[in-house]
Amino acid sequence: MRFASKSALAAQSSALKKESYDSAATIRRQNFAGIDDTPPQEDEEWVTTYMDIITLLLILFVVLLANADFSGSPAEREELRRANAILHVLGIDLQTTTDDELLSIGNNLNSEFSAAGLGDMVDISSSPGSLNIRLNDQILFRSGEAEFIGNSADKVMEPIVDMLNQSDYNISVEGHTDSVPINTPKFPSNWELSSARATFVVRYLISEGVASERLRAIGYAQSQPIADNASAEGRSQNRRVTLVLTVPDAAGVKDE
């Protein structure tokens, strides 16, 4: 009986040890099962927050520019142009704002010319990114000449000069003639006449304070008619000087 009891005790002890080992193994498996072997990843939530802030700042910037007063000094307009250049680099287009400004300038000039009784001698039109001010040659020059008539020319040029000195647009001055040939010692052809008229207008604008780097003169002679040269009325329309205002190229902005 004592032998049987010892055997029973040994068996019981062995069973207890096995149960203890099994429990320990189970605990170890449970502990290791809770461990994530995946390498830790960086928290990217800050990137989303950062991009949201940048987007909001850009929207605010665009709204401020869209509501800016474009009638300020040339220095203020230069700052706006620089801001426009920055947005251009970022891929944000302010063309709509520019076109609205040009349209407003054109409407103001039309009102001034109409009030002065010059509406029939001036035609103003706009296209995306530019404003065209077309002046009939009769109000500026005598036939076959390239110097201003006097009071009538000053009367039509004064509001244009005021507007140009309050803006930073580039100005192309284009001279055009009808198809009637000219052959004088001073102007052997319409090319010389149209170029001389455009150049005279440019020199006048410079004398009135418009920066020379914003200007250029182009003579087209009879190559770009807007009416039929077969009639006197058509030839009168073709004899013209056109000022084309365009926005300075953003790539041309220079640091002071």
Image (cartoon, rainbow, N blue to C red):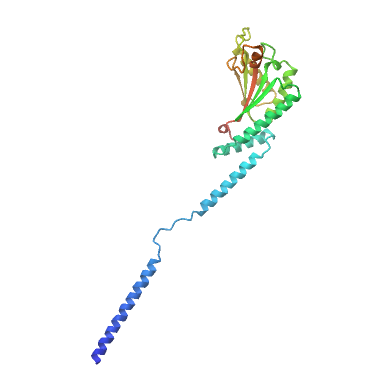
Q: Is residue 57 visible?
A: yes
Above or below, 139 against 252 in this view is above
The quadrant of the rendering that contains the N terminus is bottom left
**Residue 117 coordinates in the image, percent (x, y):** 75, 22
Viewer-closest of 10 and 229: 229
Q: Is residue 136 left or right of residue 27?
A: right
Q: Is residue 18 left or right of residue 222?
A: left
State the image coordinates of residue 239 (x, y, percent, origin top left). Answer: 65, 15
Furthest residue toward bottom: 1
- Location of residue 190 with respect to 125 vertically, above or below: above
Decide if residue 162 is in sight here.
Answer: no
Q: Quadrant of the C terminus?
A: top right
Q: Quadrant of residue 187?
A: top right
Give the vertical position of 156 relative to 31 (above or below): above
Tally of numbered discs: 0
Foreground: 253 or 223? 223
Q: Position of residue 80 (x, y in %)?
A: 63, 37
- Horizontal relation, residue 116 to residue 255: left or right: right
The location of residue 221, given as percent across then percent down, is 60, 14
Instruction: Give the quarter of the image for residue 210.
Output: top right
- Tell me which corner region of the image, top left, top right, bottom left or bottom right, holds residue 255: top right
At 72% from the left and 19% from the top, the residue drawn is 153
